[in-house]
Each structure stands twice: as structure tokens, then as C-alpha cells.
Amino acid sequence: MKKIGIMTTGGDCSGLNTAIQRVMRGAHLRGWRVFGILDGTDGLCTTPPNVVELTDNLLPIENARLSGSFLHNGQPGALNFETAAAEGSLDDFNKKLYRSIRELKLDAVILIGGNGSLSLAWAHREIYRDVQLICIPKTIDMDIPLTDRTIGFDTAVEQLTQFCDQLMLTARSHHRWFVVQSMGRDCGQLALNAGVAAGATAILIPEIKFNVNALINHIMNAPTDYGIIVVSEGISLRGHSGRPADMISRQLTAAGITNRTAFPEHTQRAGDTTASDRLLATAMADAALNAIDNNETYVMTALQNGTVKTIGLADFVAAGESVVDPNISDLCTSNAYVAPDDPLLDIAHDMGIYIGEIK
């Protein structure tokens, strides 16, 4: 009988509990036992390791739609890769994780994480040398290369779109503009997708250069005197500091455009998981379990052209744009961004949305 460990790491999102529940269900049908590792790598740092055996009573199917992670994603202030690197104890930290996995007598570990977690898993793959390591990509940022979607992205787009929908009503009532700041870090996918869905008048993302005067002119010549301007948190404005939405708002105010800022913040990580994210989580859980059946290791599940398959973690690292992590020495994360030829950019432009200087 196989023993499978599963953990969630990094920022949370909707769809994690769906993936956990589906892994548990599929594993039980195979006659395997599944142990949830609590608080990500934190749970492997305790003595004994902090795990719980997963059952249908512990994680009933009706709760699988809920946001967040049933297993949690890490304790504030706990020892992790970043703090261990800062203390100069990364080798000892890695040895502790390795010993805990050995102590649990696991056959495989399924790690559900973002691009940072997956990059770390590959960089420190010796931790998992005695088990099969299968990774499942999740993030609202959609910044993981080689997969067309990540768990949590569609729900985040829905959450941000609904947020903008509600603001649009009060914007119309008061003849004003709302500058909405989205999450996404240095990737503009969340802002782009939600902005187009909500019918934003302008969308500013890190990948596309924009001109403030052109933005102001676009707003002043819009067919309405109200609307939504979606600003990704990763944009910058030369000579200005502060939150991106505030920087853009000040420029609009100086031009005589009545506006307010709005920050949906972590509501973008919340909300009942959309059907599309549940389907993706189920397909990726199934692919992860099939990978264990097939004796694969150091792989990641990926949606490509409508099919979920596994790809090598080495391929994931090689395919993305490598960015040096400022907090962990010798670590480079593999990142994906909005491509210059992304069809949604042209669609936004054709719909009269100011998307920056793309034409």
C-alpha cells in the first residue's frame, strides 16, 4: 500500500481544497493512504512531523469548493527556505525536511505551489530523492511557464471582475472613475483578463509600456464620464512612488478627472471555486496520481492544448524567464508573463480599451 504526502505552499487561492480532495479520493480508490502535511514545509520541521491522515469525513466533498487551503500554507515567523537562507542554515533545513520525509515513510509527495515553490523544489530536489515528487501548479498570477492555466486563476478573475462590476454601478451614479489595483505581482494576466471581462476603459500591466498623457486623453475622450481603470500592482511610473493605483489616481486628479481608488486585495484569492477551476484541479489531481502509477518523479502537471499532462520540472525551469530571488541565495525563479502576441491584447485594443502603447 502506497503512502502519499500532500502539501500546499506559498500564497493561497481558490481550488486548493478541490485538488486536495480529488487527490485523496483518487488515491483511496487505488488503495493508497494519503497524509496531509500541515503548513507546508513548516509541518516537516516539527518533531514528529505535523501531518494528518486525510479521510472523507475530514475533508467532505461539499467543502472542496471553499477557498484557502485545508492544510494551511505556513506559519508566520516559522523556519522556511527564506528564513533558513537568511540565517545561513539552509543545509540544515534541507536535511531536516529530508529526514522528516524518510520518517513518514512516504512513497510520493504531491506539492501544490506557485512558481517560487516549484523553482525551490527543483533547486533543492535532493530533499525528495527517495520519493516521487509530483508538483501541481496553482497561482492567481498565472506566471508559471508551460501550462495554459493554473489552479486558482479563473476564480481570481471572477472575483476581480465581480468587484469591478459592483464599482461600475456607483461610478455611473456619481460620474466618476475608479482606479482598481489588481494583484499579479510582475505578471499582468489577472488585470488583463478581469479588465476585459469587466469592460474596463483602460488596463495597465507591467509588460506593456504606457503613456500617462495618452491614458488621460483616452479617459477624457471616452464615450462615458465614468468607468473602471484596472492597474496591475506590478506597474511603475517614473518619478513617482507609492501604490500604483494611487500614482495613477493622482495623475488623473491633476488632469481634472474625478476618480477614486479601490483595492480588492485578498478577496482575489477568495470566493467559491469556479467550475472551470474545479475541473482543472480534478484533472491535475488525476494526472498527478497517474504519474505516481507510472513511477514518474520531478514532474509538474500542466494544461496544454486542452489536455493535462506531466512535464519535467527541469523543462519548467528552462522554459521561463529566470529571475534571481532577492531573499534566497543561488535561487532563480522561472517566470511567465503576458506575451507581446497574446490575442487578448489585440482584443482589448479592438474593443477601445487603452492597454498601453501596443500599436
Image (tube, helix red, strand yellow):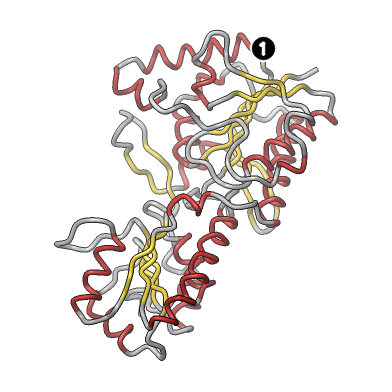
Quadrant for residue 238, please give it: bottom left
Can residue 343 be seen here? The reply is no
Which percent across, then down, holds residue 154? 59, 57
**Height in image: 175 above or below 211?**
below
How many labels, in total?
Answer: 1
| Residue at image location 40% in from the left, 20% down from the top | 79
What quarter of the picture does the N terminus occupy?
Answer: top right
Q: Is residue 216 left or right of residue 53?
A: left
The amino acid pointed to by label 1 is Lys
Q: Which of 214 and 332 lies nearest the eye of the viewer?
A: 214
Residue located beneath label 1 in the image: 105
| Residue at image location 53% in from the left, 66% down from the top | 161
Which percent across, then down, holds residue 152? 58, 50
| Residue at image location 18% in from the left, 76% down from the top | 254
Quadrant for residue 178, please give it: bottom left
Q: Which of 11 and 290 lies nearest the eye of the viewer?
A: 11
